[in-house]
Amino acid sequence: MANNGDTVIMAGAKLLENMVVVDRRTWSILDFIEDAETRHLDNPAVKKWFQGIKDLCYDMLDVSEELQIQRAKKVRFLGLRLTRRKMKNIIHEFDALIQQFGQLRLRRSSELLVPTTSLVRTIPSPTFDNETTRILISKLINVEDDEGDGIQCISIVGLGGMGKTTLAKFVFNEVRTRYRVAVWISVSQQFNVKRIAADIICFFGNEVLIDEMEVLELEIRRITTQLRCLFVLDDVWSVDRNEWLHLKRLFSHCAKGSRILITTRSKKVAEAAESAPTNIVSLNPLSDEDSLSLFKHFVQGGQDIGNENEEMELIGNSVGAYTVEWMPIYSVMPPALRQCLLYCSIIPKNHSIDVDKLIKLWMAQGYISSDEDDKMEKEGREYVQQLRHHSVFSEFKQDDDGSFKCKLDGGVSDFVQTLAESECHIMFLEGGVEMEVPKEKRVETDPRLRRHCTLSLVDQTLPESIANAEKLRTLIILSDSSYIDPSNLSSLLFRMKRLRALDMRSCSIKELPLKAASLLHLRYLNLSFNHELKKLPQSICNLLNLQTLNLNGCDSLRKLPKSIGKLIKLRHLEILWTTSLSYLPKGIASLTLLRTLNRFFGTSGSASSKECSLGDLENLNNIQGCITIDGLSGESEISEATRAGLKNKKDLLGLELWFSNAGSKDKDQILLDNLEAPPQLQFLGVFYYGGRSFPNWMIELNELKHLVLINCSECNVLPPLGKLPCLESLEIKNMPNVKMVGFEFLGIGLNHEDAGNEGSSSMIAFPRLQKLHFVKLGYWEEWNGINGNGGDDEKVMPLLSSLSVLNCKELRALPDYIKKKENLKPVIRGCPLLPGNTEKQE
């Protein structure tokens, strides 16, 4: 694409215009694309023309890229001639559409009114009034009329976009304090009692270790017995009475006054859930006239649409409710941002997606491009922030591993899936056949226009075919199956020559079909958590456009293809938890565009000329995020450590250093000294280190937030970590040679003659530390302040809120600066000599 403001259709149109004789003194198609993009929603003639242009733009971009690939691979004349023939046919069809242009009355971009955000603030609400809210709250909190101990079900019924979820969230927050247990669960189309039970258990922070229904029922009973409970099930579709009976039995141990509150589009669902007629709250939509008027206002800018009311009414019936809330927000977005939002329609409703993954998918489609290749991910993050600004996400949170996940607002999900229904399709499959979709949700579209498809599998069966597979640009398979037939997968991929994104995470595939190597347009390939995948075909290195290769969790994968260095456009190589992988091919060293390389190996270059050595990190200075380096050995890597140049990797934020647990540890200290981390590092972990002390560069990491030191068995003195100004968490585990922790650990007063006086320095030790954990320091006897003289405890760990001391069997006392923290409740176990110990050493 030409620049970052271009959409796919703009980029394709530019290519087409450069090859078609157009009277540019009069007009250029690019001047009218923005108006056509909006007008096609309500004008059947513009819709047909716009879809035709867009389809040709997709084709033109694909064929143009094929031509570039063929030239780069020096394909013979016959292949070039066939590609040029395709291009000629596209140009011929484009020329025919140009002839229709004069009849469409489209406006130039310069003539369009610039929408203002004030539109968003003046939208009339179509959802519910104060009386509806009052009635619903009364039904939830009034228990006088309850008969028996059975749980009652109350239903909010209304069309998509009418505010069911908004109303449910409001009353949930209003009444939740009246219940001992209050849980919110997003259900969507796949109603599964086992999943609901597991979600409830996870809601309380409990880990689901066994997903057998009997075990889940016992845990639910333990949580809810004789307690008044409220369970909100949002966006329910199931009319299966047996499922509802099973669910109600699950809650049969709840106390009188317990409630299930569901939101649904169908009254039949409410009846299947046995909501009494008086317990069904219906939200009434706007009148047809009001919905149509609002739809015209936002789509047409208030213009008269002539004799097109019949088509307008058909569209208004399907999207009018969503339009009221989201069309004005959508209309103020720049075209490139709109394009990214519409692509989110491949995400099933109530499904979370990793933010970095979403950005990589946008990149794969060419939605994010920049004249400076190093800025694509940054541009993607800016797009995400803009979407957050427009409140399109109902959830945006950080996981324990540091990654961010987002979930589209329910109304936004309905809205974008309606707008993108011709191009994006989500198939819920069982036995290879698409599951029946409720009538009000069913949308008839031309399958020839589909470009992106998500398959949600109940079992391992893939469909025999997918409509318009040869033009698909995205295929995402969502599966928890045990096995997918490789021949079935191969036949599916055979037709998908234009795929740019292929996601087969957790599909339990044992081998990647060779057909995947013919996907020359492919930019994004996700094979993560396929635990039986043992190898990749060498031919995968022919995917010269590949940007992302995700192999995380492929724990049977033994090696990467030796020709991986051919993937010169690779930006993200993800290989965490690939436990059978012991080295990386030498070609990795030439992939200088890499942003993600989350695992590396300290294998000595002398072991094999085909294996990467530590020094091969030298030119990979674009690496971002976190990298884990395994198998470090002072015996062979000292000469490589300086050449690796970790301190030059300016975007590296996390570093894990795993030293070899075998062989001599004498030279580990020199090795760690030479592995100087970059100053902006935020996370550092050191494991199985055999040196006696830590390097000076460690206490110069002024942005470090998290530090982990585990199995550093020879260290007998902790470094002055209190000097680290941003440190928030510190974990020290299994360091048997540490016998005393004194004032040196705090790092204060060290430059003064009166260092022995705890209050002598104005510096605060550990100014931001919140979590401190000591585990298995078996010979640790003393933990002192500075000379034990007390002093100002506010100058030591003023923000500490979590302290654990576990299995430190010789420790006798905590220092005064810990004991004086009145609000701190240390967790002390396996420390028999320490006051406050709650569990004896086993």
Image: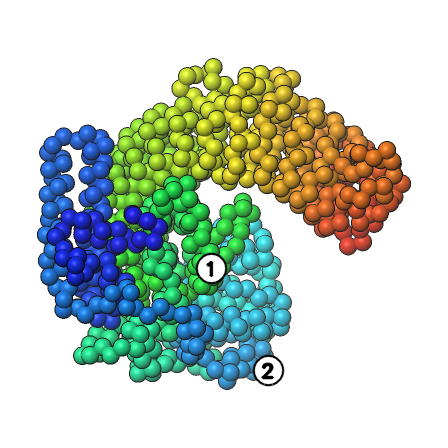
Q: Nearer the viewer, mark 2 or mark 1?
A: 1
* Front one among 635 and 552: 635
Amino acid beneath label 1: Arg
Q: Residue at x 34, y 56 (%)?
A: 336
The residue indicated by pointer 2 is 144
Per the model, the C-alpha gap separating discs 2 and 1 is: 44 Å
Q: Position of residue 203 (x, y in %)?
A: 55, 58
* Mark closest to the chain's N terminus, 2 or 1: 2
x and y, in percent, of residue 143 in the image? 59, 79
- Mark yes or no: residue 754 visible: yes
Image coords of residue 3 (percent x, y): 32, 49
Circles 2 and 1, Cβ within 8 Å, touching? The answer is: no
Q: Is residue 688 above or below residue 252?
A: above
Viewer-closest of 665 and 68 = 68
Q: Nearer the viewer, residue 714 or 226?
A: 714
Q: Secondary structure at mark 1?
A: helix
Judging by the rendered image, the residue that carries numbered circle 1 is 388
Q: Describe residue 20's horizontal placement relative to residue 732 as left or right.
A: left
Residue in the picture at 51% in, 74% down: 152
Q: Which residue occupies 10% across, 34% down?
A: 78
Figure quadrant of residue 575:
top left
- Residue at image location 33% in from the left, 59% down from the top: 335
